[in-house]
Amino acid sequence: MNYKKRHFGSYGGRYIPEVLYPAFEELEEAYFRLKDDPDFIAELIYLQKHYIGRPTPLYFAENLTSDLGGAKLYFKMEGLAHTGAHKINNAVGQALLAKKMGKKRLIAETGAGQHGLATAAAAAKMGLECDVFMGEVDMARQHPNVLGMGVFGARVIPVTDGSRTLTDAVNAALKNWTERVSDTHYLLGSALGPHPYPAMVRDFQSVIGEEVKKDILEIEGRLPDKLIACVGGGSNSIGLFNTFLNDDVELIGVEAGGEGPDTQKHAIRMSGNGRIGIVQAYKSYFLQDDNGSLKTTHSISAGLDYAGIGPELAHLADEGRIKFTHAIDSEVLDAVKMTARREGILPALESAHALAEAFKQAPKLSGDSIIVVNISGRGDKDLFITGPYFDGKNWKAFLQNEIKRLSGETS
């Protein structure tokens, strides 16, 4: 992609306030210069192997394959990467870029907390100051990640505007960047926002698909029939899909169905609910009301309740290259339990959206078909969400006892 090309079809672009023009020009020039620089590439590959822990495994889910009685299921185990999710791929890439640019501070937005955790870790590794903006609602339901960010030395800044979730955290981070442009890099966590972020995040995450292609050819001797990934903003999905765009492989993105498409509590943008608009400095599909304001979204997973979608994914959907569907909260919880019980793997709630779709598709296919699911993160971060569902009264009693114990220690 030529760095002067700032759109994917009619989507994308760079609709930014004038105060950010110099920062974006600097970032654009630096990224498209360094991305092909042998020294930068060598340092990134070193960090991917020795810090992130790449390559992550491509795991054959033998028990679930047998249970479902159809296609072979393979899981790309991004949850085994450092900090527990795919987010570290992009965070390390951008943090290294920021350091090469002479920046002293990173800021980031986060929903599920995995991007914030990865950014905080990368900042610590690179010796950079770090502030992470997170909606109050997400801070409450993802407290383990909030704690982790603090341990890494980051300051977590609560966002109290709007729905107090990911969309509002993005707004807060962009606003803060305008106040400290000279020494700060905004480490955006998904393949969206103003150019060059969609292309840059996609490129740093494409290591996922590159490893999948190499491994599946070695294991099965051919490409998979289907690739399935959850879709919030879109970094884990485009990271998986990008390497296969020119191959005869079906690409399926799974959005957050929340309590169902007929309710007001979901984040389904690409199945007739989204409207084209320009929001947060880029053009794409967004959940908007008749006045163009963003609607409140809902998902059991904090990482998928975003009102927009990455511009490249929007373009690929229009082109018919990616098929979009959704999974509702109850299907997601069932997928978590089923995967844990049968494979000994606890997936993130975000990833379980993709698993729910895979479990629907596999029985319809022949035994020689292959599905690869991106397990973009692990589920220990979701303890405070899944606990009430899976442990009921025992979970509530545990929390009450902990409050009493801690009160006694501090009295």
Image: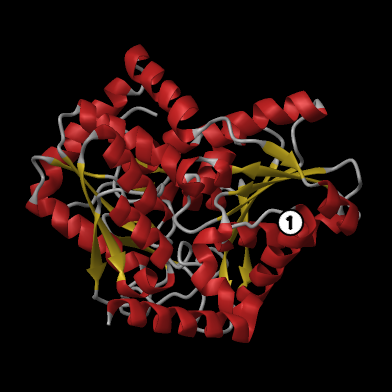
Give the side of residue 151 with respect to residue 68, left or right: left
- Whether residue 39 is situated above or below residue 405 in the rendered picture: above
Q: How is the image coloured?
A: secondary structure
The residue type indicated by label 1 comes to Ala
Q: Nearer the viewer, residue 234 or 56?
A: 56
- Whether residue 328 is situated above or below residue 29 in the rendered picture: below
Q: Nearer the viewer, residue 1 or 197?
A: 197
- For the view shown, which residue lies furthest in the top direction? 38
- Whether residue 392 is situated above or below residue 301 in the rendered picture: below
Q: State the residue at coordinates (31%, 69%).
A: 135
The C terminus: image quadrant: bottom left
**Considering the numbered disc 1 on the image, is that residue within a helix, a strand or a loop?**
helix
Q: State the residue at coordinates (43%, 31%).
A: 51
- Residue on which disc 1 sits: 358
Determine if residue 89 is in view: yes
Please provide percent x and percent y for residue 76: 64, 42
Give the side of residue 349 with respect to residue 109, left or right: right
Q: Quadrant of residue 278?
A: bottom left
Determine if residue 282 is in view: no
Please provide percent x and percent y for residue 375: 61, 49
Q: State the residue at coordinates (36%, 75%).
A: 137
Q: State the residue at coordinates (30%, 64%).
A: 134
Tally the numbered discs.
1
Q: Nearer the viewer, residue 137 or 17?
A: 137
The N terminus: image quadrant: top left
Please provide percent x and percent y for residue 223: 74, 32
Please provide percent x and percent y for residue 212: 65, 33
Q: Quadrant of residue 386?
A: bottom right
Q: Residues within 10 Å of mark 1 (few under 14, many from 20)?
A: many
Give the side of residue 286 with respect to residue 187, left or right: right
